[in-house]
Amino acid sequence: MTTFDLRIDHADDNSFSSSLIHDALELHWQLGTTSHDERVASPSWAKVRLIDRTQAYTPALIGKRLRIYAHDGTIERVMFTGQITGLQPVVGSRASRETLLMAQDALTELETWRVRLPMAFEQRADEVVQTVLLGVPLRPVPRAERWQLGRVGRGELGTLTRLLLLPPMSLQTGKTAFSVVGDTWGEGIRARDAIAEVVNAEAGRFFISREGVFTLYNRHHAINAPPIATLDNDYEALLVAHENALSRVSVRYLPRLIGAPNSILWHADTSLACAPQSVRHIRLTWRDDQDRPQGAVTVIPPQAPQDFTVNTHAQGTGITLKDGFTVWLSEVSLSGCVFSIRNGLNQTVYVRDAYVRGTPLTAHDAQTVSIDNLNTRAMYGARERVEHHSPLNTPEKADAMARYTLGRHDTAQTTAKRVTLSARQHAHAILNVTLLDTVRVLSAYPAHQADYWVVGEEHHVTHTGTRHHATWTLEKANTRRYWQLGNHALGTETRLLY
């Protein structure tokens, strides 16, 4: 019989030594996506109903790291890792002294923080995702995992420990190199949207694992992986749909044009004041002549007097200064910069006629590549999917993406969407199968057999742990569509994998 544990990391040392399971009445948590169409997971969550006999569940717990464990008698597995975000006591004259504890994983922090990318070109999805994650002030890693120079057991960087600012990541190497990413982000976009841009263009998957690790899989992950569990009509519920085919896939991409060197990327219309003995930072975005966001492939640090002058008067009628101040770009990205002024004088100074110059990168109007399957149209009718992938900048890359997508949906097919299991029949599978593992589903009605990837998992544990149900969100693996050396005939039974 499976037993569960609910632990808090009070010491912030990854020990998770404080157990709450003796008060737990109900455990409910979810990881991954709730739809097979989503490639970037929503924040995972957990809700735990607790009996609060001693009023121990107070706001002091908010922010603490929490884990749910399951033990099958041999192996203990982590089932969820998150941070406590709230506690909701049940109050009133007939209150049962219960508290609802709520937790979410670190994807929540990506929902609000805005990012811009530094100048880098020909990057893969894993490189972009890592840059974005490092640009978000995520909660520091536990103390036990932080690197300390010269301390035994804490000085082995990269094996036993990691740098304080480096979140736990497992990023598979992307299959597509994007010429440029982030040049149209202007003042910045949400970190989750930034990651989604490249993950969707890679056709990969991004989520946080049960152990709390940021995980990226490329589009080849598990493409030919054998199933690690088989469900043969012994599930609690199965949601099945007979889906129509796509006869056309259109991919919208953004061509880019590199402009002339030493072009004006930004110009200040007014004087920029800086108070005495202070520093001022001005966040800028590159814009074209029509005030649309654009990028830059090179940026030249401003130099006086060609790029600015400093005066004691806003109108430039005072004394032109040559020292006592510093003007520099404290941050440079593809879509903008931070223009910084340090005033070491005891009077206000004014930076006038400020320019930032460089080589602009302009995104043209989006272009479309469409791929048709005439046989599918004749058999099933016209049905189109349109995808927007701004990291793709050539018709060749858009064409390859369109063919890949159409190849997965060019026939009408039966598809299992979700399956609900009980631990009475599938205790091992529920504990062992996690996100992007492959499972085989067999159904007598409707008659169906296929392999699927688990892209979402939701667990519900009640009756002091004796009842455990799990619902998996599924995506058809389509493993037999792609050529394998020695197993298939190329061009007749299968096609090359993009």
Image (cartoon, rainbow, N blue to C red):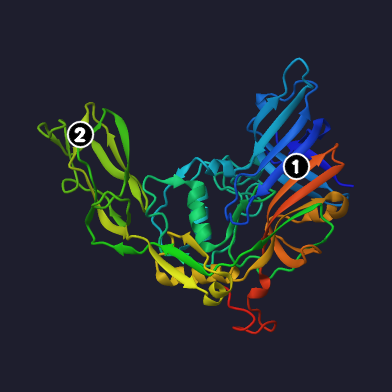
The quadrant in which the C terminus is found is bottom right
Q: Is residue 126 left or right of residue 449?
A: left
For image coordinates 28% across by 57% down, the residue present is 360
Q: Which mark is residue 294?
A: none
* Mark sitting earlier along the chain (2/1): 1
Which residue is tagged 1? Answer: 68
Quadrant location of residue 98? top right
Which residue is tagged 2? Answer: 350
For image coordinates 40% across by 68% down, the residue present is 394
For image coordinates 42% across by 48% down, the residue present is 116
- Crowd band around label 1 with a 10 angstrom C-alpha radius: few (<14), some (14–19), many (20+): many
Task: Kindly give the residue lying farthest to the left in the view shown.
Answer: 317
Quadrant location of residue 343? top left
In whole angstroms, how far apart are the C-alphas of marks 2 and 1?
A: 58 Å
Circle 1 sits in a helix, a strand or a loop, which is it?
Answer: strand
**Do tag 2 and tag 1 residues touch (Cβ < 8 Å)?**
no
Spot occupied by residue 70 in the image (x, y as percentages of width and height): 80, 46
Spot occupied by residue 373 in the image (x, y as percentages of width and height): 52, 74
Circle 2 sits in a helix, a strand or a loop, which is it?
Answer: strand
